[in-house]
Image (tube, coloured by chain):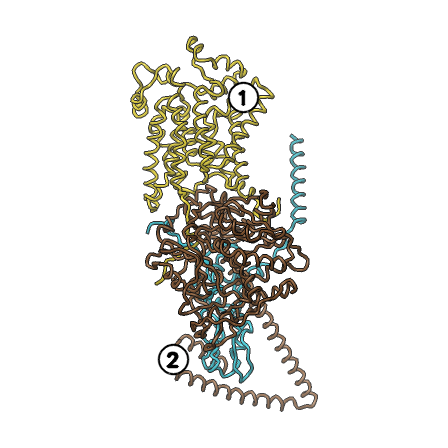
Amino acid sequence: MIIAIIALSVLAVAFGLTLGYAAIRFKVEGDPLVDRIDALLPQTQCGQCGFPGCRPYAEAIAGGNADINQCPPGGEATIMALADLLDRDPKPLNPENGQEKSKTVAIIDEMRCIGCTLCIQACPVDAIVGAAKHMHTVIAEECTGCNLCVPPCPVDCIDMAPVKQNILAWKWPYPEQKAAGRTT
Amino acid sequence: MPLTTSTSPHAKGHASVTAVMLQVLLALIPGVAAYVWFFGWGVVINITIAATAAVAAESAMLIIRKRPVRQYLGDCSALVTAVLLGMALPPLSPWWLTVIGVIFAIVVAKQLYGGLGFNPFNPAMVGYVVLLVSFPVEMTSWLPISTFSSYDMSFLETAAFIFGGQLPPGITYDALTEATPLDTLKNNLGQGNTVAEIRAQLGLDDVTSLLLSVIPIFGTIGGKGWEWVNAGFLLGGLWLIYRKIIGWQIPVAMLGAMALISGAFALYDPGHHASPLFHLFSGSVMLGAFFIATDPVTAAASPTGRLVYGAGIGIFVYVIRVWGGYPDSIAFSVLLMNMVVPIIDNHFKPRVFGHGRK
Amino acid sequence: MIGAIRRQLWTFHGGVHPVQHKHVSTQSPIRRPRLPQRIVLPLHQHIGEPAEVVVKVGDHVLKGQMIAHATGYVSAPVHASTSGKVVDIGEAPIPHPSGLSASCIVIEPDGEDRWIEHSPVENYREIAPSALRNIIREAGIVGLGGAGFPSYIKLNPGHHKMVKTLVLNGVECEPFITCDDMLMRERADMIRGGIEIIRHALQAEECLIAIEDNKTAAFESMRKAVAGMDKVEVVQVPTLYPQGSEKQLVRVLTGKEVPRDGLCLNVGVVCVNVGTAAAVHRAIHLGEPLISRIVTITGGAVGQPCNLEVLIGTPMNELLSQCDGDISRIERMIMGGPMMGFALHRSDLPVIKTTNCVLAATVTDLPPARPVMPCIRCGACADACPVNLLPQQLYWHSKTKDLDKVQEYDLFDCIECGACSYVCPSNIPLVQYFRYAKGDIWTREREKEKSELARKRHESRQKRLEREKAEREAKRQQKKSALDATGMAEKGQEEAAAALQRAETRRDAALREAEKRRGEGWQEGTKDDASRTRESERDSN
């Protein structure tokens, strides 16, 4: 009886020590949660989530102050990724934040631009170049399609155009499920 | 004018699921023929009942699940499940036993998991095990080979018994049935007899046994009669390998593992362990190796994985036969290995072209 | 002789034997079609960067004149394939699986077919390999086997690498296609010329010409052509699809496996299509750039299947009509073969440098896809895969869009040969799933890069704004302290306030003016207007 108790206690202590040692020795240094959330966001900095940029939204999610379905540019893919990371149930995009649209890029009508620099100040990623009283233009590669430059323009010379399909960016579509699916 | 487009390859070979399943059914014929020759018409009636029940159950489930019935029924996979299960049951199983087994196999083990291609466990074997656990008496009442049966039942008499429990006048059920060779071996070994003693008692040639009016249990290499049934399935299985319907890996690994392990024990202690040939040609080993374990849906995928999977089944069969509670164990072994298929698949990937040798 | 000894060959895993259909298009010799009404030359007919236009609409160009030059290292120029007038430069439909349009130069032939002055190389052996490569680059030569990789890059072994074997690929393993077969039968001398030049450029020790054993006429013709050449051997290989794939062919001939992500060069081999070799011969010995190629016109909808020597840019329907083609009978029109080619969405697309075959298939040639059944994991695909992948596992994970898992199963080693789909008893479009998954992974990676860039730009902007704010603050402090020192702080502050007031009034007026201007001409977008009003309110506050 006593031997059994002693044996089990010794075993328990030994295993406990092993586990404790392993926990310290093999500790995984993870990225802080905010960074990991931020990495999943599309970085449009559009503010449609109700926060001034992607990182503040990431901080809000990490702090429990925002839900994972408030990012229209990221859409379903981002919600799924966030749900996966945070081990939550995915949910549809909150319509109050907007709808998932195809990607757009800002285009300045250079004939109408008066060179007021207001859009340059609005752009969250410095994708608009130009000086005061000179025509501005958008660096299409850098533009995130966030829409933030459109409201400040006093002459309404900025258009959001859908990103043009081209052969280089084209990809094969997901195969249609013809017969394998349900009968309709 | 816009043309119809499609993605490559635009050319297509002739293989189809239906063709695969039909060839499997075709390959079963020699084994079934031997079965009928030695054990009477029961198995044919079983298969017919099972097939009817399977088609009915499959159709009902497809309708409930809103799938195109004709297309999915046409793949003949339900038929294969039914035939395999029908063959695994004792020849004089009452009709309801077969029906329950088939319905469980099709409805629970196959369709509730998502139908063909999505079931993790071999449906026929799930049905078999459910019956074996629920109706042990019916499932262990086997027949001796017909030459030595106390009464040779005709097709109609067999049907009458299966459907109505009606035995021909003057015949009792106990007189008709007989323990299988594997069962006999297990019990006798349990009583302390050696293999040689049992064989001497029960492995007599036809003339002697007729004279002594002892029913011979053991044939030349395996169980009497069973060795021929197994040979029939072996023949069909080899044809399937030749036709490339199944790979060689699972049968070879399973039979090889059984031969190795039983050979090792038979060499070590021949008195208490039957020979490898006896093990390979008794019970439903060949049926299991070529037709049940090779069910692609529930087997491992890669060639090496299939070797491991087959060997696992072989080892389980031997272990359960010798040390387990059941005389034969194809069903349990297959189901046990079904469970580890995902792990096997994860660990045994083939070496991809251009990758370093691991 | 060397040819009499049977050479040791190796094998690769898997492969399939589709029905060949090759004899139909080898009954008549190669001929030239009529000069077309229009020539449409896409700027992007090769792998790499599109070419850049160097002519204007209205220019008159000569046959062989460069009209678009290569941009960047991996790129190839485009030449006018006949003399005539440039009538358009812009988007036009091109042969591409997407069915999209791309930049093209359209030439209206003047009917004279007048060449530029040829400047052939007198003696290529006296020229440095790098100069030779440059001529090949300027001639616009790309791999004519189907991929269209600029050839001059392939002919550059780099400083450290030794090329032991030059492999001439005359395998042509796809059904229906016979353009290389006919080229080898009729123009073996040109291929020989190309081999000599390429061997000189690469300094390759030996040369193997691989031909499948279903092309005996081509085999004999090539044997005759290269007789007497040192260390050149024509090798007959057993017919097996996809043996024409570079890495598989190198394995069959040399027993070496090209490492993943590696090139044939890594195992001392360079592999060139026979058509490309003939084009190199033309560029060096005749001074002709790549402006035409041999195209197989075949399929059940073609009355007289044959091989044509086609000017690049010729519309395909013109070729079909010259071979008794009946466009109304076409079920699917395919550029390339039935295994790896892609279906065209219209019949008037131009022939490009990589068009080896136009397959006008009827329903009997290529029956419509049968209904897809669930995967039964039978493993037929894994048995057929020439790369030894597990297509059923890849399919499972591509279907559920598990992009990490598909990469674990080496999706990117897939060569999209279609052998798995060909043998699948469940008729699953496996290759399409794999292409989709590859595209999705690339897109996601691009998007990730883009969002990473956006984050960095946003962060640097935030930092800049903070720095500017701090600087302003510092300046203000400095000024304040300076004013304090002179005892004029109060006055200064008053002045500053007044100036601010003035500035604000001015800006308000300007904004109101702008608002009015917009109100006159631009009435749409009420939500935008509302937000703009908010914006201006915030400004004026």
- Locate residue C279, reporting x and y percent: 53, 61
Q: Is residue C203 left or right of residue C107?
A: right
* Image quadrant containing the N terminus of chain C: top right
Q: Residue at x 63, y 53 (%)?
A: C266
Seen in the picture, residue A96 relative to C300 is either above or below; the reply is below
Q: Please state which of residues C263 and C76 is positioned toward the viewer in this rendering.
A: C76
Given the image, on which type of amino acid does mark 2 rest? Gln
Q: Is residue C72 left or right of residue C337?
A: right
SS class of the residue under badge 1? loop
Tell me the SS state at disc 2.
loop
Q: Position of residue A34 (x, y in %)?
A: 57, 61
Cα separation, mark 2 vs mark 1, equals: 95 Å
* Residue in the foreground of this view, choosing between B211 and C513: B211
Is the residue B342 above or below the residue B38 in the image?
Answer: below
The tint chain A carries is cyan
Quadrant position of residue B275: top right
Q: Which mark is residue B275?
A: 1
Q: Amino acid at mark 1?
A: Ser
Residue nearer the viewer, C73 or C481: C73
* Picture residue at 62% right of the left edge, 45% below the top: B357
Q: Chain of mark 1?
A: B
Residue at image point 61% right, 46% down: C2
Compared across the picture, whether C125 is left or right of C316 comes to: right
Residue at which label 2 appears:
C523
Q: Which chain is yellow?
A: B
Task: Name above or below for residue C516 compared with residue A95.
Answer: below
**Chain in brown colour:** C
